[in-house]
Amino acid sequence: MELKTFLKLFREFPQIDQTAKVLSRPNSHIHWKGHVGSSRSISAIAVAEQTPGHHVFILNDKEEAAYFLNDLEGIYPEDKRILFYPSSCQVPYQFEEIDNANVVHRAEILERVASGFNTWIVTYPEALFEKVITKKELERHTLKIGTGDYLSIDFVNEVLFEYNFKRTDFVTEPGEFSVRGGILDVFSFSNDNPYRIEFFGDEVESIRSFDVDTQLSTETIKKITIIPNMENKMMEEKRISFLKYIASKTIVFHKNEDLLYQGIDKLFNQAEDIFNKLAGEIKQSNPNELFCSSQLIKKELEDYTKVQLINTSVDSDINFNTQPQPSFNKQFNLLIDNLNTNTEKGFKNYIFCSSQQQEQRFHDIF
C-alpha cells in the first residue's frame, strides 16, 4: 500500500471529519490530543486536504519543523504546495550573515502567497520573528517578464541596478546579473536557479532557467518574476508580520503557544540589546520596525482559525487515541502475537516497509 492510499483511509477517521467541520467556522479554535510520532503530521495534512486556503504549521524550533516537513514531503514528494519558511539570519542586526538560500525561500513564499497560490507552510519562531514587506511593496519591487514582451535590455539593466543587483561576468548567486550581447542572465531572489533571457532586438524571444555549475538549461519558462532581496533590512519600506501578510482565512497549526512567545521574547530582547549597543555607530531601524514582539504575534494569532497540538484544555478537544508501537526486539513471535491480538479486537493491521527488500523479508517471515 502506498502512503497516498493510506492517507485516503486516514481521511475517513471521524476525528478528521470532525476537525474539518469545526475549522469551517471562522476564528474557531480546536485542540488535538492523543498523537504519537508522525501521526500528528499525517492528521494535519489529511485536514489540510479537506480545508481550502493557506495552512501554516508552527513548530517549536527549526529541528522540529524540519522533521514535520520531512513527513509532509514523504507523503507528497515534489508537491509545490509544501514550503519551508526559514529565518534569514541567526542574530538580529547581523545582516552580513544573512543566508541567501533562506532569503530565496522566504521570497518565494511571499510571492506564492501574494499570487493566491494555496500553500502548506512549515515554520518556527525565529522565522516569524522577522517582519516582511507588505504585498503592495512586493508588487512595486517585482519585475515581470514574459516571452513576447517588448522591453530593452538597457531598461532591464537599469531596473536591476535600482533593485541593488550586482553586474558580474557570470551569475553564481541571487542578486547578480550579466549581459552578453542579446542575452541577459539574472538570479532572482524568488527562484532556486537563475534565468537566461534571450532578446531579439527589444523583444523577449525566450526564457529558460539554467544550472549555475553546468550552465545547461533546466526548464523553458513563459513568464518570470524578478525580485530583489526583500530581507535587506536597510530598505526603508514598511514591514509587517508574516501572519499579517497571509490571508485571514489561513488555518494555523501550532505546537506550543507558550514556547512560541518565549522564543519571540528572547529574540526581541536580544534585538533591543544589540540595537542599543549600535546606537550612534550606524543608523539602524528600530527593532519594532524590523521584528515582531510576542505581544504582536499573540494579538494577530487571535484572528486565525487554529489547531493546537499539545495536551492543554481549550475550546474543543479531539482525541486521536494513537499509541506508540510496542518494542519487539526482533522477536517476530511477539510481533505476530500483537497482530493477532489487534485483529481479535477488531483492528486492521498495516505494516509499512521502506523498501521492496524489506517487504519481501516480512512476507517470508509470515
Image (spheres, rainbow, N blue to C red):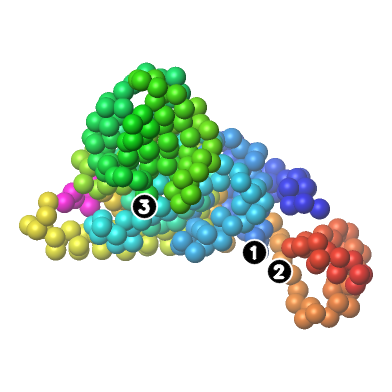
Q: CA distance from mark 2 to mark 3?
A: 40 Å
**Residue 200, quarter of picture:** top left
**Residue 326, quarter of picture:** bottom right
* The label number, if any, that marks residue 324 in the structure image: 2
Residue with the mark numbered 3: 100
Q: Is residue 287 magenta?
A: yes
Q: Which residue type does callout 1 highlight?
A: Gly
Magenta range: 284-289
Answer whether residue 239 is visible to the viewer in this image.
Answer: no
Label 1 secondary element: loop
| N-term-proximal mark, 1 vs 3 | 1
Residue at image location 56% in from the left, 61% down from the top: 67
Q: CA distance from mark 1 to mark 3?
A: 32 Å
Q: Position of residue 252 (x, y in %)?
A: 51, 46
Quick check: 253 left or right of 35? Answer: left
Label 3 secondary element: helix
Q: Position of residue 294 (x, y in %)?
A: 34, 54
